[in-house]
Amino acid sequence: MRVPTLWLRWTSAAALVLGSALSVQAQEIKFWTLNFANDSANRAFQSIVKQFQDANPGVTIKVEQRGTDEHKSALRVASGSEQAPDIYFMWAGLGLGGEFVKSGLALPMDRYYAEYKWDDRFLPVALSFSKDYPGGRFGVPYTFKGEAIYYNKALFQKAGITSEPKTYDELVAAADKLAKAGIPAFTFGGTVNWHVMRLMDEILETACGAEKHDALMSMKVNWAEEPCATKAFEEFHNWTAKYTLKPFMGIDQLQAFNLFLAGRAAMMLEGDWLVGQLRDAKRLADFAVFPFPTGGKRLYGFAEYNYVSTKSKNPDVAAKFLDFLASTPVQQAHLGEFGTISVNKDVKYTSTEPLEVAWRGIFGGYDGTFVNGDQAFPLNVTTEYWRIINQVASDSLDPKAAAGELQKFIANAK
Amino acid sequence: MSVRTSAPTQGLILLAPALLVYCLFAVYPMLDVAALSFMKWNGLSPTKQFVGLDNYVQVFTQDPVFWQAVRNTVLWTVMSVIFPPAIGFALALALNQSIPGRSPLRALFYLPVIIAPIAVATMWRWMYDPFFGLFNATLTALGLQNLIQDWLGDRNVALYSMFIAYVWQTVGFSLVLFLAGLQNVSQTLIEASRIDGAGRFQVFRYVTLPALRPSITIVLILSIINSLKAFDIVYGMTGGGPAQSTQMLALWAFTQAMQLGDFGHGAAISVVLLLITIAIVIPYLRWTHTHRESGL
C-alpha cells in the first residue's frame, strides 16, 4: 500500500503549507497609533516591530499612524465595524481612554496581567490607570509623560535671570525681567487648543491647590462659585497679554517650537518628549528644564496606554507584542526615544545628558500627578474649556466672566 | 423574436441603476441622519436611545457655538454669492474678447479649481503665517508693518482671510460657466441690436445679460450650495478657531459627531443645515422657473 501512503504524505504536506499560509494571514496585527513627535521614535518603533516579527515568524505587525484628531475619528468609525485595529493607542484615565473602555472597545487584560506578571514590571504610577475602569484591568502602559518649562539658557542670562524659578512669584518675576529685556517669556501655538490649555491647567493647580483643582476638573464643585477659578483665568490672561510671544492664536505648536528654537521666546511649556526633538535639532545644550512652580507636590503629566481591541481575532498575539514592547531589553535599548523615562521599572538610567538627568530629578521629586484638562474633562466640556481659554487669550472674554461661562455649559451638559 | 418596450419603460429601465445607487448612497444616508437626530448615540455603543426633540432643544438653546456657526455660514453664503460670481463674470467678459494669450489665461484662472481644497488650505495657511508668511513678509518689505495682521488668529479677520482663499479657488468655476454662456449668445442678435442703434451698454443690458440668465442661475445656485457646505477649507485653515469664531455649520456638525462623539447633536445640526439649504434653493429655483416660463 505504498501509493496511498505517499499520497497521504503529499496531501498532509500541502495541507500544512496551506494551513501555515492561512495562519500567517490570520496573524496580522493591526496597530493604530499616533504620528511620533520625532524621527528617533519613528525609527525605534520600526526597529522594535521588525525584531518582534523576526522572533515570531508568521506574525505581521501593521502599524498605521495618524494625527491626534484623525486617530480619534478613525477609531470611532472603526469601532462600529470589523475593520477595527487589534491594538490601539489611547491616553490613560477616565477621559479619553475611558470613553473607549466604557463603549466596550477595549478587551479586559486581567489574564495577560497575570500571565506576563506586568504588575511586577511597570512603574506603579503608570500602572495605576489600568485599575481605574470598572470590569477589570484595561490597557498596557506605554509611556509616562511629564510636562515642565523648557528655557533658553542664553535668553535667561541676557535678561539677568540667574537661577531657575522655584515659586510662582519667582516665575512672574522672571517673566518681568524678560519683558524688560524685550524677550517674550513663552511661546504657544493657539490653533491646536491644547497647547495654551497647559498654561491654564498649571495656573489652576497653582491657584486652587490639588484638592480643589481635582474637584473642579471632575465638575463636583461650581466653577462660578470658586474664587480660585476666576483668579486662575485672570492670571492666565495676564500671561497671554503680557508675557507671550504674539501673535500666537494663528500658529500651531510646531511653529511655536520653531520660534522657540529660533530664540524668539525664552520658555516653552512642553513634555519630556521635547528632549528627543531638541536632540534631532542638535540643540540639547542650549536649553534646560524646570517644573512649573505650582507650589504643590504633583507633577503635571499623563500616561499613554496601548489597548487590545475586543475586535481583535488574535488577542494573544497582540498581548504578546505589547509584552515585548514593554520588556526590559527593548525598553533599555530604546530609552530616551519615546520619553525620558520608561514605564518599565527595571530599566537602568545611565545617560548623563543634562536634560535627561533633570527630567529624572523632576519625576523623582513629586508624589503624584495631575492630568491635562483634555484628559480630565469629558470631550464636550473640553471643547468648551478650550473655547473659553481661547476667548480669554484673545481678549474677547473678560477673564472675570470665564469661570461662570464654563459653569453654564457644565450645568447644561449634565 | 424581439421584445418591444415603450419609451417611458425604456427610460425607467435605463434610470433604474442610477436611481438605485442614488437612493442607497444619498437618500438613505439623509433619512438615516434625520432619524439619528432624534437619538442619543456616541458612535461606539451598540444601542441608540430615542430622545425626541432633545437634540434640537440642545442645539438651539444650549450650544454656545451653534449660533456663531449659523452667522458665519450665512455671512459666508452671502459673500460667496456676490464675490466669486462677480469676479468670475468680469474675468469672463475680459477673456471673451480677442486678447493675446487668451487660452493660457483661461487655463491659469481655472487652475485653482482643480486643486484639492485641503491643499489650498495648507498653501494659504503658510502664506498667512504671521511670522514667516508671504503676506506679512511683503508688508514688512514694503515698510507697511502697521498693516501686519494675525490673519488666521485674529477673530475679527480670520473669516475674511479664509474667504479670500476660497474666492481664489472658486472664481475659476464661475468664470468657465459664464464664458460658456457668453459664447452661446447669438451674434445675430447682437448685430441686429447694433444696427438698431444700441450702444455697448445697451447691447450688454438687453441682449447679453438676458441670454446669460441660465448661466447666472446655475452659478448662483451652485455658489449657494457650495458655500453652505464649506468644510475642507475651514478645517484645513483654522479648524473653526480661534475660539470657534470661524466655525461653520457643516464643520460643527462633523466636530460634534466625529470628534466629540455626540452623533445625535451632530445629526440635528446637519438637518438644520439641510433645511436652510432647501429653504434657500427651492424658492430660488421656483422663481427662475416662473420667470423663464413667462419669458421675463
Image (cartoon, coloured by chain):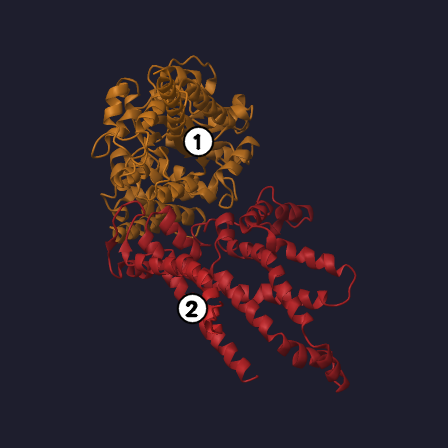
Q: Position of residue B188 (x, y in %)?
A: 73, 80
Q: In front here: B275 or A188?
A: B275
Q: Amino acid at mark 2?
A: Ile
B194 versus A297 height, above or below: below
Chain on which label 2 sits = B
Residue B231, numbered label: none
Type of the residue with mark 1: Val
Which residue matches tag 1? A63
Image quarter of the C terminus of chain B: bottom right
- Label 1 resides on the chain identified as A
Residue at the image position 58 percent from the left and 73 percent from the top: B214
Q: Nearer the viewer, mark 1 or mark 2?
A: 1
Q: Position of residue B77 (x, y in %)?
A: 50, 64
Whether residue B193 is situated above or below residue A218 in the rendered picture = below
Observer-nearest of A310 and B207:
A310
User: The chain drawn orange is chain what?
Assistant: A
The location of residue A358, given as percent across then percent down, is 42, 20
Can residue A153 be seen here? no
Give the residue furthest to the bottom: B196
User: Relative to residue B237, is residue B81 depicted above or below?
Assistant: below
Q: Which chain is red?
A: B
Q: Residue at x 45, y 66 (%)?
A: B13
Q: Would you name the residue on which mark 2 appears?
A: B278
